[in-house]
Amino acid sequence: MSDELTLTRPESATPRTGEPLMEVKGLTKHFPIKGGFPIRRTVGAVQAVDGVDLTVYEGESFGLVGESGCGKSTTGRLLTRLLEPTGGTITYRGQDITHAKRKQMAPIRSEIQMIFQDPYSSLNPRQTVGTIISGPMEINGINPPGGREKRVRELLEIVGLNPEHYNRFPHEFSGGQRQRIGVARALALQPKLIVADEPVSALDVSIQAQVVNLLQDVQREMGIAFVFIAHDLAVVRHFSQRVAVMYLGKIVEVGDRESIYTRPRHPYTHALLSAVPEAALGDDEEVQRERIRLAGDVPSPIAPPSGCRFRTRCWKAQEKCALEEPPLVQIDGNSPGHLTACHFPEEGSIIGDKEIVLDPGLAAMESDGADGPTTAEETTGPVVGGPTAKDASKDTSKDASKS
Ligand SMILES: Nc1ncnc2c1ncn2[C@@H]1O[C@H](COP(=O)(O)OP(=O)(O)OP(=O)(O)O)[C@@H](O)[C@H]1O
Ligand code: SF4
Ligand SMILES: [Mg+2]
């Protein structure tokens, strides 16, 4: 996050008090890889999500963070049942919806909504805003008091748009306004759970904060539970009461916001946090964060490493890490609900100046970009050395700016 972003911070990391809304156990999604000629058959699988356990409580905001390709969007689409799980269970308000068919899902559909990353492609350009927002009401046969048009106008007002723009088309709005239309559409059926997949990452830096604040208001005032997916730890910190960190299809650490940000135990969480600029973390940090450069690339989800999936990039890896997968458990010293999947966790504070091997790709970029950020995009987010050059350049710019 750049300094341009002024986010309203929640007064406190309100502990979740509601009942479990959605419970996920062992959730798995493997995308088959087809090959062979003339008969095509399954020759492997992308293990996009591989044994995820998580619980979302009523009215809470739950952040899901990780590098590109770690399975965040796939998890979001599984939760909203836009994708069929390969394994595991999804329970919504006590009801098993893992493989629920369209008819079984009908009464639940309206309660679980999704906001997508791209406000351009997620709105039908040939429909007016009124039609787009009232669409879910029509499909579900819902006629609010005063009619659908009245409700749409109310929704436009809630998301900060002019109700008189009811008859306009998506192309007549800016990117931020379009994302507001997406939010209004998601609110139309008074959902209990919204999965927001990188809802601000396609927006201009200057309007990201406005949309995050809108979502935060909606979450608090309407008591809607949110799963907020992002690669940007700074945004997630501002928005979420609890945070889960994902790596190569698995959750490696989860806990309340304060524990994750001030007393992380998993080496990967340390690495992600070390890339967050101090300013974006708030002014109450007691610890100075040292920059950790992750060695190597994210391994392929087609053939992930044995044991701990992070071991190929972990500075603490030992033989046990290759042999045994670490369970996601509450380890000694963690606060209640703070779970970590690591055999040799870090101490409960940010590590100091460790010598960690610099990925050669990152090193090259670092020497090229030693002058720090040069474009607006480079200042948008803290991303650790990831699989894409774009991510790596953001990472390098942060490092350069601190040194
Ligand atoms: N339909 C699909 N078929 C095959 N592989 C897929 C499919 N969808 C996603 N994947 C793969 O699954 C893995 C996880 O993808 P996913 O989109 O969930 O990651 P992500 O964490 O959302 O990444 P990003 O931050 O880039 O959005 C990736 O390796 C991706 O290539
Ligand atoms: S289990 Fe081993 S390889 Fe995995 S994060 Fe912990 S120390 Fe590193
Ligand atoms: Mg994604």
Image (cartoon, rainbow, N blue to C red):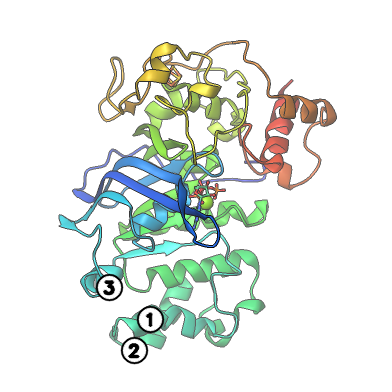
Mark 3 highlights which residue? Answer: 102
- Numbered disc 2: secondary structure: loop
Residue 228 visible somewhere in the drawing: yes
At horizontal 23% and vertical 60% (from top left) the residue drawn is 97
The spot of residue 174 in percent (x, y) is: 65, 69
Mark 2 highlights which residue? Answer: 147
The spot of residue 191 in percent (x, y) is: 31, 65
> Is residue 24 shown above or below 263?
below
Q: Quadrant of residue 178?
A: bottom right
Residue pushed farthest front?
Answer: 38
Mark 1 highlights which residue? Answer: 151
Label 2 to label 1: alpha-carbon separation: 7 Å
The spot of residue 26 in percent (x, y) is: 28, 42
Label 2 to label 3: alpha-carbon separation: 27 Å
Marks 2,3: beta carbons within 8 A? no
At horizontal 36% and vertical 56% (from top left) the residue drawn is 78
- Disc with the residue nearer the chain's start (2 vs 3): 3
Q: Quadrant of residue 288?
A: top right
Quadrant of the drawing holding the N terminus? top right
The reply, left or right, for residue 394 in relation to residue 327 is right
Q: Mark 2: which amino acid?
A: Gly
> Is residue 305 shown above or below 139?
above
Residue 158 visible somewhere in the drawing: no
Q: Mark 1: which amino acid?
A: Arg
At horizontal 39% and vertical 24% (from top left) the residue drawn is 307
Name the quarter showing ligand 2: top left
